[in-house]
Amino acid sequence: MLILNVSNLDVTLDALKKAGGEIVSVDGKPLNYGGTRAVVARDPDGYLLELIESPKAGAAIGVTVAILEATRRFYEGLLGFKITSPATFESKALESLGTRSAKHTNGGGL
């Protein structure tokens, strides 16, 4: 999942819909998490996006894996990527898709 901070969620969602994307959050609308609005959507190619309204632009990539430590060794050791802590909205993003039974694991300080 590509995670994007956008300055105006409504403008971004309008552009996404016009380009052929769709909102996949429960009830098809943004959710409010402690004053921050966010939504899960699909881009026109079907890839999942988490759009978070924020005055600070930025992006991240969220990956779901079966064996966290092996994936960590691959991305950090082999590819040299820097892995940081998961986004605070990750569990909420899963809920917004209607996935109530998902479990989020921090992975010991990633």
Image (cartoon, rainbow, N blue to C red):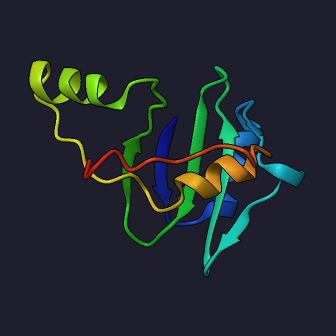
46 vs 13, nearest the viewer: 46
Q: Position of residue 90 (x, y in %)?
A: 53, 52
Q: Residue at x 37, y 44 (%)?
A: 60
Image label count:
0
| Residue 90 falls left or right of residue 15 | left
Q: Is residue 66 above or below residue 13?
A: above
Q: Is residue 61 above or below residue 35?
A: above
Q: Position of residue 65 (x, y in %)?
A: 45, 26
| Residue 23 falls left or right of residue 62 | right
Q: Position of residue 11 (x, y in %)?
A: 66, 59
8 vs 82, nearest the viewer: 82
Task: State the image quarter where residue 37 is shown.
Answer: bottom right
Q: Position of residue 34 (x, y in %)?
A: 61, 80
Specify the farthest residue to the bottom: 35
Q: Is residue 106 above or below residue 34?
A: above
| Residue 63 falls left or right of residue 34 | left
| Residue 63 falls left or right of residue 79 | right
Q: Residue at x 72, y 45 (%)?
A: 101
Is residue 12 in sight in this rendering? no
17 vs 40, nearest the viewer: 40
Is residue 2 in sight in this rendering? yes
Task: State the image quarter where residue 73 is shown.
Answer: top left
Q: Residue at x 67, y 25 (%)?
A: 44
73 vs 23, nearest the viewer: 73
Q: Residue at x 50, y 66 (%)?
A: 7
